[in-house]
Image: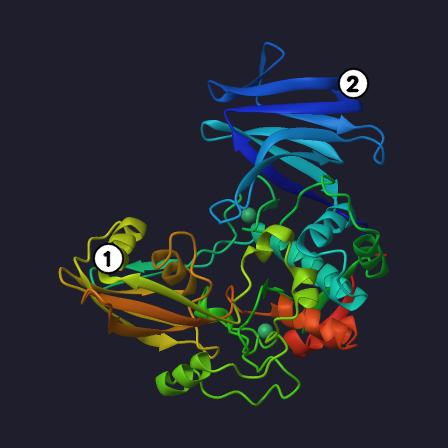
Amino acid sequence: MTEPFVQVGIMSATQIDFDLSPHYIYKEEACTGKSSATYSEGKIRWRQQLYDELVFESVDGDSASFTLFNVVIGKQFHWQRVEDQKFRGNLKFIVEGNQITAVNVVPVEKYLESVVSSEMNATASPALLQAHAVISRSWLFHQMQSKTKENSGDRFVDTDESLIRWQDREDHLHFDVCADDHCQRYQGITRISSPKAIEAVCSTRGQVLTSEGELCDARFSKCCGGAMEQFSTCWEDKNYTYLRPLRDNDDVDNLPDLTDEAEAKKWILSSPDAFCNTTDKQVLSQVLNDYDQETHHFYRWEVSYSQTQLSQLVARRSGIDYGLIQDLVPIERGPSGRIKQLKIIGSLRTRIIGKELEIRHTLSESHLYSSAFVVDKGLDANGEIRFVLHGAGWGHGVGLCQIGAAVMGVKGYTYSDILNHYYPGSEITQMYK
Ligand SMILES: [Zn+2]
Ligand SMILES: [Zn+2]
């Protein structure tokens, strides 16, 4: 096998402004300079003509680059912003719905250099960067592979009594991955790729994680909160041996039964030892980009709502009027303490929602850090009921914990130690040279 190309969806809009360096051609004609592509009657209008699809090929891989203007990054997250971004490789425009989408077609290893640079700070240890390169590569190939597979079964249950749904990433029909946090953050070469990230990608070139001969679905999130979650708490009802619920320290089997409500409460309200239990800024800055560092407390965190605030928030986020919310009751928790099914009891109706992401989405203006929380109900000074959510971790907690892995790297563990810890029983396999 030789190194493949990946198609990355960068942005969608009715008009996309772009700039090509002098090394691009469209159907053998040299193209350069500022231009714009506009959606028109199901087609792309460019230079007064209509096209089904437009591909600008780079003729000189290393010096050719193009710029896309006004790319939105961090969609729906608190760090959302707009910026101009520069890319290498080919530029393709396709029509999707009533918009056009700009797709970057780029060799996998080049894509990874940018992903690892975007996701990780240049101050990260080589072990952390190498571990990340391997899981980003595995994740990518798994994604490209699953795109061609059939969609697996029902993705939600929607009745009067319950709404259990989950979103996975098989959403992109016309390209492999998007450039935002939904898939992996990819910002082209706007932020100069760090030499250390490039070195980590090169030194692990072609390496992926496999288990029993199959490519691993190498999930990762920011902070597990002390325990790794299993797959079925967040997505489809299946589990993998290498995505096992374990304690995030050397004593991996020393994990209380957090599916038990009393144990979960004790766990979340305390600050148990774990690799990711750190406030060391030097370590946190390895994983968090500057704008992510706006938030520091996510190993243990707290969010508080008045009854009115919570009721209005849930109505707005879910589109369902529960009336005044009386209680939030965990029905089922996963082994990391993350709530898989939550009962919302309102004055007008009561319903169970799940899974993990649906809960986070419903209970916050953007996304709650995680669904591992316990609810404390009390009265505030005005005599109104107040809901305080005490929580643990940031993200779904399945697979590699980025903060924990950063700490492991600093402590001198190698990248294969880190991968073994977060994906027990997996192997590093060379896919291409
Ligand atoms: Zn995506
Ligand atoms: Zn962790």
Q: In this view, does 358 lie to the left or right of 112?
A: left
Looking at the rendered structure, the kind of residue marked 2 is: Glu
- Tell me which corner region of the image, top left, top right, bottom left or bottom right, holds residue 344: bottom left
Name the residue beneath numbered marker 1: 311
Q: In this view, does 73 lie to the left or right of 302?
A: right
Residue 33 higher or lower than 232, as above or below: above
The image shows residue 89 at horizontal and vertical percentages of 75, 35
Total marks in image: 2
Q: Which residue is drawn at 27% across and 56% down?
A: 309
Q: Residue at x 55, y 69 (%)?
A: 398
Residue 335 higher or lower than 124, as above or below: below
The image shows residue 69 at horizontal and vertical percentages of 62, 28
Precedes in sequence: disc 1 or disc 2: 2
| Circle 1/circle 2 CB separation < 8 Å | no
Q: Which of 151 and 336 is in front in this view?
A: 336
Name the residue beneath numbered marker 2: 28
Q: Nearer the viewer, residue 80 or 137?
A: 80
Say which element carries label 2: loop
Looking at the rendered structure, the kind of residue marked 1 is: Ser
Residue 402 higher or lower than 155, as above or below: below
